[in-house]
Image (cartoon, rainbow, N blue to C red):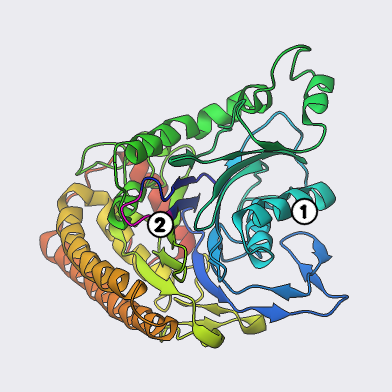
Amino acid sequence: MGEDMCDTMVATPEVTANRAMMLAKNSDREANEAQNVTWVPPADHGTEATVQCTYITIPQVPRTRGMILSRPFWMFGAEMGVNDAGVAIGNEAVFTRVKYSKTGLTGMDLIRLALERSSTAKEALDVIAALITEHGQGGNGAMEGKLYYHNSFIIADHSTAWIMETAGKHWVAESVKGSGAISNILSVEENFQLSSPGLKEYALQRGFLKKGKTLNFRKHFKDKIYSFFARGDVRRRCSLNNLQGSEAIELSDMMSYLRDHNEPEPWVPGKKHMERICVHAGGLISSQSTGSMIAVLKEGAPPMVWFTGTAAPCLSFFKPWSFPPENTFKAPAMAEKRDGGEVDLYGTAESRADNKSLWWIGEDIHRLVLPSYRTLAPDLQKERDALEKEVAATVQTAWLQKSPSDLHDLCSRENEFILGKTIQMRDRVAARIKEEQPVPEVPWAFCRRWKKYNRKAAWPGDRFLK
């Protein structure tokens, strides 16, 4: 069975050190389900134009915005992204008592459509509400197997953040004060400010709510069985504990929250997989953090977004991007063009291993380190942290001082620098393993599951069970 388990969190200007809005997400999908970081330029469309989404075709709008998205390679939509107006969105699969539809707009379609059609967080919320009312949400969310679900979202701009949760064509929205987090479980209870028309009447009609009682969206719409196995309650609590434990949240804090294994480091992979923010596949529910993003939004400043472009944020670099002036995106040398002027910034990865895309170069590191994580990860992470700190300091200073053109040029150079360091890191890890031959430290069943993933992807570096 395919999985789409994720974690999204937001820190509003009230609680961040630089008074910026920060939205962060780990996208958890199947182990070989590569996720590409894609630049989508703004575009004009004819009055009769349509757009082919993952499963259905809908009318297009006259003008769509520029976006940077992190998207599963086989989908129209995106797991997360930010647009040139400074709106950022991340979503989660949630499991409800409302029947799932075999077709419709996926949660990922809804993110992309909302980003290309909105200039504020509230506009994006309205776009999603209108789309699920008119076209419905649905379709298989899994690359392999079958998985149907509904969606929750965190939607943010520089001043406002909303948690929006849905069940079929029904929805509620609650504004975020301070910080907030969502996972694979409904979390909005009674204090929502907005909702779909007739929501309470629907709940009464279906027997979810008893007459005279106050509607609690989480309590009355949650599917208890799927929600339990997804372990979203555990991961959401971990996110909230991290967010609420800091008085002035920094970019580096958000990076560390997305890397959290909910256990002291160095951590041993192979147990309680779905209770980690940084998820590694290998359990009964084989979800994995296949891409990560942090959007930083501040009034009067261009939107900044940091992507890993790789799985396993605990072993990855966050890389900066800003929006280019006049849509002249300076992509890295490994970038690949797509139809419609879109560009996969780190190459176009798919489900089979390759040596050209960053996603699979990152998997070389991840899959080589994972069996002996406690032995190999600390040195790699120490080197990564020092380089990342240096890059972040340079970019954050330039963010508020340089012109949009100079800032974009700087991001492009820093990306090339980090990409080169990533390849060097991969080669050093491989050489160290060849020299030291570290013994796998993880459970046998975990190794066996990874052997299957590696065989299916034709990954050449497999050392599990050797």
Residue displayed at 78% across by 24% down: 203
Residue displayed at 60% across by 27% down: 189
Q: Quadrant of the N terminus?
A: top right
Point out the stretch of residues depicted in magenta: 16-21
**193 and 90: which is toward the camera:** 193
Per the image, the residue denoted by label 1 is 131
- Against 367, is 430 above or below? below
Left or right relative to 231: residue 435:
left
Q: Position of residue 446 (x, y in %)?
A: 36, 42
* Dot label at residue 53: none
Residue displayed at 31% across by 42% down: 261
Query: Quadrant of the rendered structure where residue 453 is?
Result: bottom left
- Against 238, is 391 above or below? below
- Characterize the local packing of mark 2: few (<14), some (14-19) or many (20 or more) Cα atoms within 10 angstroms: many
Per the image, the residue denoted by label 2 is 20
Identify residue type, mark 2: Ala
Q: Position of residue 355 (x, y in %)?
A: 39, 76
| Farthest residue, direction left | 436
- Characterize the local packing of mark 1: few (<14), some (14-19) or many (20 or more) Cα atoms within 10 angstroms: some
Q: Position of residue 45 (x, y in %)?
A: 78, 79
Identify residue type, mark 1: Leu
Q: Indicate yes or no whether the magenta region holds residue 398.
A: no
